[in-house]
Image (cartoon, grey):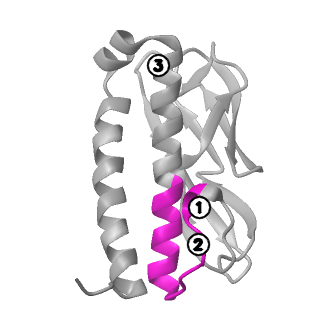
Amino acid sequence: MATPTNEQAIETSKGLVDTAVTSVAALYNTDAEKQALGGESWRDVERAHKLLLEAKRFLEYAVTKNRYPGKDPWNRNYASVPALQSISATPASKTLASGSSETQQLTVMAVYADGTQIDVTAATTYVSSVTADATVSATGLVTAVSSGASTITCTFEGQQDTVAITTT
């Protein structure tokens, strides 16, 4: 059997990670499954989902930039991947009507030292400062609850950005 080239190995790995991300995301995004799994098991699914998204980011970077770091994505030693400089969440602010279940999907882009930008929305952690006014899902979907204001803090690999939410 022939040994695959780095490019073949990366492309094959990317396909496997894409399949795993889709499978875990289907479980992760199902409320019935969340209720069935409960506390710690559900947190395990969340961790697996974020790890797979991180692996996917690593592989996408490797394929896009034609770089093949010597270490795998799970040990987080990305010799050839440039440092994360910042993240940018959009929109920067949004007004939502409460009582109408109006929502806003946030998008988070990671900016690396070489200028590369990668969508990390699904791998970002979100927290609402005032959940009585606006809630945010694990995937970055903001929902108006009641009139007021809330700040959504988005965190990815130690970098943070905020989104100002006003609910009327």
Q: Residue at x 30, y 47 (%)?
A: 22
Q: Residue at x 62, y 18 (%)?
A: 133
- The three-letter code of the residue at mark 2 reads Gln
Residue 8 pos. (x, y %) = 33, 82
Q: Residue at x 51, y 63 (%)?
A: 57
Q: Which residue is mark 3?
A: 41
10 Å neighbourhood of mark 1: few (<14), some, or many (≥20)?
A: some
Instruction: First in sequence, mark 3 or 1: give its number.
Output: 3
Q: In the rendered structure, find residue 25 and report the number of the disc placed on it.
A: none
10 Å neighbourhood of mark 3: few (<14), some, or many (≥20)?
A: few
Q: Which residue is mark 2?
A: 117
Residue 145 pos. (x, y %) = 53, 16
Is residue 9 covered in magenta? no
Residue 18 pos. (x, y %) = 32, 58
130 w.r.t. 59: above or below: above
Extent of the magenta region: 54-74
Q: Nearer the viewer, residue 63 or 122?
A: 63
Is the residue under label 2 in contact with that under label 1 (CB below 8 Å)? yes
142 w.r.t. 11: above or below: above
- The three-letter code of the residue at mark 3 reads Ser
Q: Which residue is mark 1?
A: 109
35 w.r.t. 151: above or below: above
- The three-letter code of the residue at mark 1 reads Met
